[in-house]
Image (cartoon, helix red, strand yellow):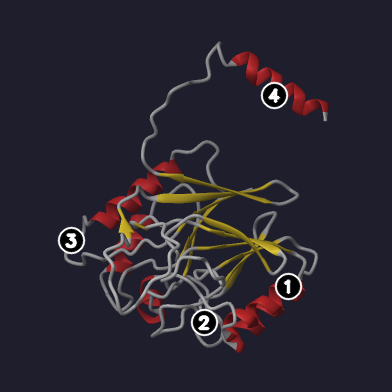
Amino acid sequence: MLVAQITDIHLGFDPDDPDELNRRRLESALARLADMKPLPDLLIATGDLVDTGDDNVSYPRLREALSGLPFPVHLALGNHDSRGPFRAAFPEVPATDGGFIQYAIEDYPVRILVLDTLEEGRHGGGFCERRAAWLSERLAELPDRPTLIALHHPPIESGLPWMTENPEARWVRRLKAIVAANRNIVGMISGHLHRPVVTSWAGTTLSVCPSTAPQVALDLEGIDPERPDGRAMIVADPPWFALHVWTGEGVVSHFDTADEHDVIARYGASFQPLVRLLLAEKGEA
């Protein structure tokens, strides 16, 4: 099973331009994924789908950009999104009681539970008692089924001083208690940080996918909100995506950019002995 992930698209950053930079960056990532062999089984976009959630133009443009792909697409919400306009453009996406965009994807070897961590009016995440109860109920339904959780906000102290969560926040502790209590969770995938990050959390692995929109600069030095110091904040690195491989024993996450790579070696006769040797060694185990 191969799960592709994109995140933090921020479509509509330039709302008057249907061919804006973030649309072109999105399309380059989608083109890479659609040309892969093997194809992903599905694609999950983990939030900040648009830049301004009450924008009535960007969600229809996103729907257009995602149409015609050779695999199904599933969507989660981030802090830049808004449930009402999202539902107007994507009425087929399931919602729970209370209107939260949370649902289960059931048709694969690994079950995927998509969470809604949007707390309107906040940059950071949220996960109320109602959303938590839904997650607990879904996990209890199939306690032996391998399950992957997809959400926008990584519930961690990331080390990025202006893009991070408080690990003692109530919503983080609420989610952590559920994840720690359920051993069928084989991994979590998220976005929000605009950087590739992998860590362990609550007894499982958390992988943070970099964005298709421009990236956050890697800077772990503390930041003073009262003293701008001229540091780099956003950088024009290529659009990224993630591929999560279910091996039957665990989830392995890979990250790559949508840009063309400079190839310095190809699989020809000179590489054949090495390929034969490595595959033979694998067979000896």
Whole-number angstrom distance, CA of label 3 to CA of label 1: 45 Å
Mark 2 burial class by Cα count in 10 Å: few <14, some 14-19, many 20+: many
Q: Which residue is mark 3?
A: 17
Q: CA distance from mark 2 to mark 1?
A: 18 Å
Q: Amino acid at mark 2?
A: Gly
Label 4 sits on what residue type? Answer: Leu
The quadrant where residue 38 appears: top right
- Label 2 residue SS: loop
Q: Earlier in the sequence, mark 3 or mark 1?
A: 3
Residue that label 1 marks: 180
> What residue is pinned by disc 4?
278
- Judged by depth in the image, the label closer to the viewer, 3 or 4, is 4
Q: Quadrant of the C terminus?
A: top right
> Which is closer to the viewer, label 2 or label 3?
2
Label 3 sits on what residue type?
Answer: Asp
Residue at 71%, 24% in the rendered image: 279
Q: Residue 126 shows which numbered tag?
A: 2
**Disc 2 to disc 3, C-alpha distance:** 32 Å
Asked if residue 255 is positioned above or below residue 115 in the image, the reply reads: above
- Answer above or below: position of 39 versus 161: above
